[in-house]
Amino acid sequence: MNTPSYDKDQAETLALKAIHFILADEELQQGFLATSGVSPDEFKDMIGEPEFLGGVLDFLLGNEEQLIAFCEANEIEPTEPARARYNFPGAITDY
């Protein structure tokens, strides 16, 4: 079993970077909204909620192409979002 290598603050920072990445791309933004069922207004209200931040990372982890693009844009290893994900409720342990 993997253990978290990110503390909560680091994980939140990475999730916020993921939100920025999603919002910067209209196609990703629409895909996230459609997949999550969250409206644009709800999106703004939920940004600080741990469950939502975990869902944002899940969205990126669910598509290798967007995950790689996010990691390249942030100069991090592709395993880092999954490690950060362990800090949020509902983490799946087998990415």
Image (cartoon, rainbow, N blue to C red):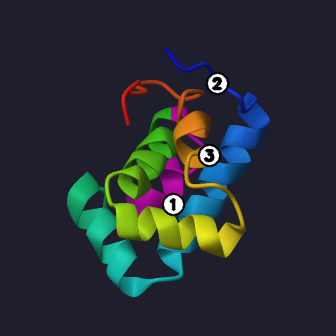
Residue 39 image point, x, y percent = 31, 63
Residue denoted by label 2: 4
Q: Is residue 23 above or below residue 45?
A: below
> Could you tell me which residue is drawn at 28 percent across and 70 percent down?
31
Q: Give how far apart the Cα atoms at labels 2 and 1 are.
A: 27 Å
Q: Is residue 50 above or below residue 78?
A: above
Asked whether, in this view, residue 77 is left or right of residue 27, the answer is right
Q: Give the range drawn in magenta.
A: 40-50
Front residue (pair 18, 50):
18
Residue denoted by label 3: 80
| Number of the label disc, if any, that sits on residue 44 | 1
Mark 3: amino acid = Glu
Asked whether, in this view, residue 21 is left or right of residue 41, the answer is right
Q: Give how far apart the Cα atoms at labels 1 and 3 are.
A: 25 Å
Residue 50 falls in which quadrant of the image?
Answer: top right
The local secondary structure at tag 2 comes to: loop
